Image (cartoon, helix red, strand yellow):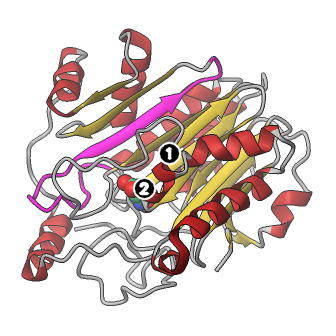
């Protein structure tokens, strides 16, 4: 059973949590560092762990890894092994990580490993490759000492899967990638459901440390009830995540296929290189997806978040309902409602 999160209890740091209107983000963040931002509400807890690294002068790379490990472990958020399975009943995880030197690593279609982000980091640091998938990724993880977890669905995922099997219909719902049996599966639903559960299966996080170096990660269980073998944007460098230490860093969430189509996070960083603010760069990338999708854009959600070298941050999405968490001080860890185009 998923434990309910008391959202206002922000633990040892005593951090505050409330939604800021997003216009504040573009005006009040000049030359701010360190800073960490991450997608969706679960980013508040992840930011707290990342902030502990950043506030002590640690490296952004360590901060983002430790930040999203919180989410991968959490029973409240279905990013990790507790998440919904693919349509054959297996949970498969995707993740990538990128540092300030352009080093990057990823894993996709990885099963039975609790922390794909850490395996992605090992791929980056210990292999000549960027991306390992499936059985090979798992073999590498085990060789590196990661324990093989039991092949077992969480009780919630098992319930959702049984429910899903009744119709076996693959239909992602806007802002709710998770749990097929939620009563309030409707467009524009809140990120957090009435019953207190989180409904997202991804966290993307980008950070700048006190030295002004950028890193990022994106980690996910992917779309629930996907085809076996499906891989989304999250482990793909340039799609779910991109970092350029001269410019900024961006990450994505939502319908991965449409993020891949435009090399979304890379596009956001390139738009910032041309002088756009993080928010405007995210907006332009969202608009490009909408242009490609035409009338079908109303059926999907994609959100981008980004930071630049000045410590400015921003985010944008297709539909209402996306938010992201921003942290840049012991007492500043708050949610921002993403502006939306449609
Ligand atoms: C995917 N982008 O696998 C991920 C899903 C996601 O919140 O972001 N869910 O397509």
One can see residue 162 in this view = yes
Q: Is mark 1 within 8 Å of ligand 1?
A: yes
Task: Report the magenta stretch's main SS.
Answer: loop
Which residue is at a point 65% across and 45% down the rendered structure image?
267
One can see residue 9 in this view = no
Rendered location of residue 249, percent (x, y): 67, 38
Magenta run includes residue 223: no
Badge 1 local density, few (<14 within 10 Å), some, or many (20+)?
Answer: many
User: Which residue has dot 2 on it?
Assistant: 256
User: Which residue has dot 1 on it?
Assistant: 240
Apparent side of residue 8 relative to residue 30 in the rendered image (left or right): left
Apparent side of residue 35 relative to residue 42 in the rendered image (left or right): right
329 or 14, nearer to the observer = 329
Magenta run includes residue 94: yes
Look at the image and give the residue range highlighted in magenta: 80-101
Label total for image: 2
The quadrant where ligand 1 appears is bottom left
Quadrant position of residue 222: bottom left
Rendered location of residue 170, percent (x, y): 23, 72
Which residue is at a point 19% across and 28% down the rendered structure image?
138
User: Is label 1 in contact with label 2 (beta carbons under 8 Å)?
Assistant: yes
SS state under label 1:
loop
Rendered location of residue 339, percent (x, y): 71, 71
For the C terminus, the quadrant is: bottom right
Q: CA distance from mark 1 to mark 2?
A: 8 Å
SS state under label 2:
helix
Q: Is mark 2 within 8 Å of ligand 1?
A: yes
| Label whose residue precedes the other's in the sequence (1 or 2) | 1
């Amino acid at each position: 059973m998923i434990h309910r999160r008391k959202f206002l209890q922000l633990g040892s740091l005593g951090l505050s949590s409330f939604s800021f209107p997003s216009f504040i983000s573009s005006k009040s963040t000049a030359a701010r560092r360190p800073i960490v931002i991450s997608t969706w509400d679960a980013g508040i807890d992840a930011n707290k762990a990342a902030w502990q690294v950043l506030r002590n002068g640690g490296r952004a790379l360590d901060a983002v890894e430790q930040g999203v490990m919180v989410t991968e472990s959490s029973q409240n958020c279905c990013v990790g092994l507790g998440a919904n399975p693919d349509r054959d009943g297996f949970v498969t995880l995707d993740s990538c990580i990128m540092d300030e030197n352009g080093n990057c690593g990823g894993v996709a279609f990885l099963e039975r490993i609790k922390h794909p982000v850490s395996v992605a980091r090992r791929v980056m640091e210990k292999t000549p490759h960027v991306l390992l998938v499936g059985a090979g990724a798992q073999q590498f993880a085990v060789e590196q000492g990661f324990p093989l977890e039991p092949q077992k669905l969480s009780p919630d995922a098992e319930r959702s899967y049984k429910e899903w099997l009744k119709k076996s219909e693959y239909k992602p719902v806007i802002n709710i990638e998770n749990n097929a049996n939620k009563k309030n599966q409707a467009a524009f639903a809140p990120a957090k459901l009435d019953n207190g559960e989180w409904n997202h299966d991804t966290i993307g996080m980008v950070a700048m440390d006190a030295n002004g170096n950028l890193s990022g990660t994106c980690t996910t269980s992917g779309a629930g009830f996907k085809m076996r073998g499906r891989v989304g944007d999250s482990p793909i460098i340039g799609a779910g995540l991109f970092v350029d230490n001269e410019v900024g860093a961006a990450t994505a969430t939502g319908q991965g296929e449409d993020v891949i189509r435009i090399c979304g996070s890379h596009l956001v960083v390139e738009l910032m290189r041309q002088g756009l603010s993080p928010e405007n760069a995210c907006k332009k990338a969202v608009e490009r997806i909408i242009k490609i999708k035409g009338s079908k854009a109303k059926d999907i959600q994609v959100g981008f978040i980004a930071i630049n070298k000045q410590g400015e941050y921003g985010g944008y999405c297709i539909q209402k309902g996306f938010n992201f968490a921003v942290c840049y001080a012991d007492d500043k860890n708050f949610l921002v409602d993403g502006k939306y185009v449609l």
